[in-house]
Amino acid sequence: MKVSLRWLSDYVDITVLPEKLAEKLTMAGVEVNEVQVIGENWKDIVVGKIVGVGAHPNADRLRLATVDLGKQEITVVCGAPNLVVGDKVAFAHVGAQLIDGHTGEVVRLKPVKIRGVVSEGMVCSEKELGISDRHEGIMVLPPEAPVGTPLSGYLGDAIFDLDVTPNRPDCLSVIGIAREAAALTGEKFNIPEVCYNEVENAIDFFASVEIVAPDLCPRYCASLLTGVKIASSPQWLQQRLLACGMRPINNIVDVTNYVMLEYGQPLHAFDYSGIRGKQIVVRRAEEGETITTLDGIERILDQDILVIADKERAIAVAGIMGGMDAEVTDNTTTVLIESANFNQAAIHRGSIALRLSSEASLRFEKGLSRDLPLVALKRATQLIGELAGGKVAKGVIDAYPGKWQREPILLSTAQVERLLGVEVGLSEIVKALELLGFSCEQTEASLEIRVNIPWWRTDISCSADLVEEVARIIGYDSIPTTMLSAPLPMHEPIPMLSLRQKLRNVLVGCGFQEVLTYSLTSLEMMSKLSPELRLIGPAPIRVAHPMSREQEYLRTSLRAGLLSVLARNERYQENSIRLFEIGKVFLPRKGELPLEREMLCAVLSGLQRGLFWRGKAEPVDFFVAKGVVETLLSQLELVASLELTKDETLCLGRSASIIVGNDRVGVIGELHPKVSEAFELSETAYLIEIDLDKLSSLIASTKEYQPISRYPSTSRDIALLVSEQITYQQIYAIIQDFPLVTQVTLFDLYVGEQVPAGKKSFAFKIVYQSPTHTLTDEEVDRVQQQILDKLSQEVGAALRA
Amino acid sequence: MLNQLEELASKAFDELGKVTNLEELEAWRIRYLGKKSDLIQTLRSLATLSLKERRVVGARANEVKKALETSLAEKKKGLEQGLALSLQRESLDVTLPGESVLLGHLHLTTQTLDEICSIFGGMGFQVVEGPEVEWEYYNFEALNMPADHPARDMFATLWMDSDTKTGDRPMLLRTHTSPVQIRVMEKSRPPIRVIAPGRVYRYEATDATHEWMFYQVEGLAVDKNITLADLKGTLFEFTRCLFGEERKVRFRCDYFPFVEPGVEVAIDCLACGGTGCRLCGNSGWIEILGAGMVHPEVLRRVDIDPEVYSGFAFGMGVERIPMLRYGIDDIRLFYGNDLRFLKQF
Ligand SMILES: [Zn+2]
């Protein structure tokens, strides 16, 4: 919201610099984004009076204006259509800094010769002065403007651009800010008395108000004026509206806007002749009822929307926008002024349903004071009387079914100290609250007061609210800084946190870059994970109103996100890419929040290591990926076994379940070529996916020390010839199972000319060791023979010569 | 005896001629001059001989020993020189690149989260987590924002598709990490001291400073006698740990429906030091945290008596911190996952 310093000064003496005031407001909760000083550059611009207007000798569209500047008169060439003798204007001498009316650039005024006539200075438009965008004519100053004085002294201003928090609708007004400014600077706050004469018949003679929906309209006030004359508002009023970013329309509408800016109460003026049956009815709209609002759009209403109606039809959407049928026009003579309080939720919903918001609805939505309508109505009635003439009907209509009873709140010094951590004396508390308009009475208890809430404050409902009021007046800076001193709460470690950290660190050590991808994705993206482009896995949960199709569904796996990142980075990363993400996937559950499963997904493609000048870098393959899984699990003291599996995203025969104990915790494999193609990948990629919730449950919480054998170990190499169908695991399991065998390592696998067709050769290094004695050659030979016998029996293995 | 000695000597000289490196030389030394060598054994056995024999054999044995030792020294010198020469010949081009070990990086957000959590961890705050898809209740009502509350407009919400007609409660993507406060307080009693990092979501058009998904860290401390002064102390320490001791920290009044009094924490602008620039919107200050004393209504709702207990809560955006620190001017870089960006950190 924008507030002018000059306008503020109507209610409070501002004795500090604008920047200082801005700082005080900001610290106390009303953030000032910007202070725009108007007239800062108005050197050499003074108030002048047009004393003569003559024709230009050489140009029809230009005229010569003679301007009285007090000590001198100057005649200048002027193209504006609105030169009137006697008007007060802003006159710029040569050398003044102005804004070019056409280009918008800052220029310095030079003497010029226009069509043969020398012009030293000029009469300015609002745009040239930087006040507004208006450039149709010169700016006319109020008649009381003192001739010869610098314009900055007369019209200079500072405009505060404020961010008002939603709890303070009272601060969406000049008076609200003035009250804050007064409290923060200690100056007195004054509000001029409102008085006017009521000479017309009683208002009841003209209209009555019926509130059919009192739940949505706690109060409805109205006044009426006959014989008004619609015209432009005076300059000062237009000026203030413009400074606050509102466009002047006519004197009636301008007054309603002016009072809204002044008091924060939205008002509406009806052309009385448009109200049928002398009746105002505040009711819910009928289903399908229509109204054409002031913006010219016909709107279809429903029962959730509150309307202001006459006897026959809706004439305004309550609190949001008026209707065309009772709009104030140039022909209007009698106006009915509405000043009401509407239910904030009703206005909020109506505004959303109609996709229509206005300065009025934005205020009503925040919940306004029920005491405000009458105060604001009287002010508007007075101003309309003054500016548009007319006779004010006797009395006002005040339908007030939702009368407000506000209870005082008890506050003690102990409560203040308990929340703020600093002792504040009772008198200081009272002083702070009274500056803000609260009234305080001592209660029977010592050091306790009963605080009455001022009628304009809708945000105060408990003692904590009052403590904040005290804090912001004494200043947050005056509250000390202390550290928490209480003993630490008991903490239960969360296993997932350390698991995640461990995995991350190992993966980074294995050359993987961590990425974080969006949780929302599209069906299209997810279906790329299947060669048939169909959705695999559980049905994803949809966002009700997605921002775009790319962000429509919650991801059910991390795969697609990671593969798109891989594709995107392949373009400028030639050698080797390894990526991983640890994050949540979302699986639907009936009647419950989705299951948020913590997953790890990693992808790798390209070379096994960076390019190097010695040796050849091989591309990554299944076993490089498997090595990563084994490294990860060994860090967690877990051992995985793999088992061929079917997974649509991966190649059959090159993909496997990762099994820990009896649980399938994940999959690993080579990406299916069709999937690779769908993601536009250029290299063969391998994918690892592990369910961390499952993994976490398998991690042993206890660990026991293994004594180190004091006796030497012996190692033997054996080469075995087996049929091609036999797996490594079958042989490994047999050897590993023998006593004294402590380590079995495969160091060669050979298939080819040197072995018979249908056979392959495994070469193992077997380490033997005893915890009780030094092994003799005979002992080792004996065990090794037993191993060979068993291998021969069970898998048909023969020792290779 | 003498014959044996002569044979030994000629064999030793013969073998020494064939030695080509220092290891062989050492083996040779042990064989012919070591404690167990024939020559030394011979010298030791002199005592068993007659005086005459002892003199003759002894003198010869000593001569042979000296000769062997001299030859050994010469040979050794020769070999060492040769080695030095050959090493010199084989010297490396040390400027050739070393073989790099593949190393990844943690995501910048993870690094920042780790840093924040470790600072608060040092102050006794434990990390907790909550769901990203939440009930409307936890995201709003329980935080003192009933339906149609004007403050809800501060949180443009992504609602989940749910059939409210069949009685399903409205579900949403949490707009802040504050619901975790409620979940923690529902489950545990004071004293409570936790922080909750995580993803949050907003219905928002993206640009250089806005992203629809980002990370927040929430904090909560509830106990007897927790005050605004404690809040100031805790967050003052935190900001200075994160941004350096020379930073000024500003606490001003602000409004969040679930705290009262409410606080905004800002630091003096890193770019201009407080004089005003584009980064700080000419204010000289950069907002870092929203905070405040837990609202009595919020405490009451989780059955914690606000007359007995008090607490403070705070929340902060995570990406903003590295953005300020490293001068990153576009938040979309974080989850765009361009490795050329991520690998810089
Ligand atoms: Zn700055």
Image (cartoon, grey):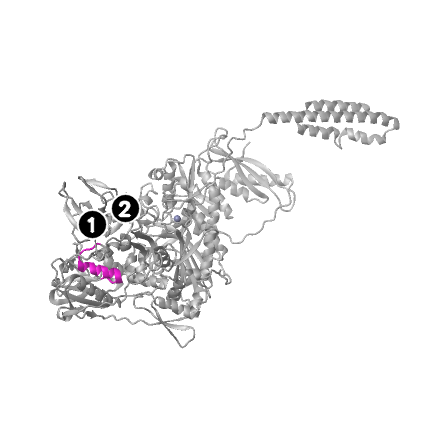
Q: Which residues are magenta?
A: A247-266
The crowd level at tag 1 (other Cα within 10 Å; few <14, some 14-19, many 20+) is many
Instruction: Locate residue B13: give its quadrant.
Output: top right
Q: Is residue A680 visible?
A: yes
A272 relative to A369 in the view: left or right? left
From mark 2 to mark 1, how far is it between C-alphas? 16 Å
Q: Magenta stretch: dominant SS?
A: helix
Q: Does dot 2 land on a helix, a strand or a loop?
A: loop
- Label 1 amino acid? Val
* Residue at mark 2: chain: A
Question: Residue B282 versus residue B1: which sits nearer the camera?
Answer: B282
Q: Quadrant of the C terminus of chain A?
A: top right
- Label 2 amino acid? Ala
Which residue is at the far right?
A: B51
Question: Residue B20 versus residue A789: which sits nearer the camera?
Answer: B20
- Answer with mark 2 or mark 1, whichever residue precedes in sequence: 1
Q: Does dot 1 land on a helix, a strand or a loop?
A: strand
Question: Residue A309 versus residue A57: which sits nearer the camera?
Answer: A57
Residue A770: x and y, percent? 62, 45
Residue A609: x and y, percent? 47, 35
Residue appearing at x 75%, y 25% in the figure: B70
Question: Residue A359 versus residue A14: which sits nearer the camera?
Answer: A14
Q: Determine whether A730 is above or below A473 in the image.
A: above
Q: Is residue A215 visible?
A: no
* Residue at mark 1: chain: A
Residue B183: x and y, percent? 40, 60
Residue A96's label in the rendered image is 2
- Foreground mark, 2 or 1? 1
Q: Is mark 2 within 8 Å of ligand 1?
A: no
Circle 1 residue = A67
Q: Is residue A252 magenta?
A: yes
Q: Is residue A76 magenta?
A: no
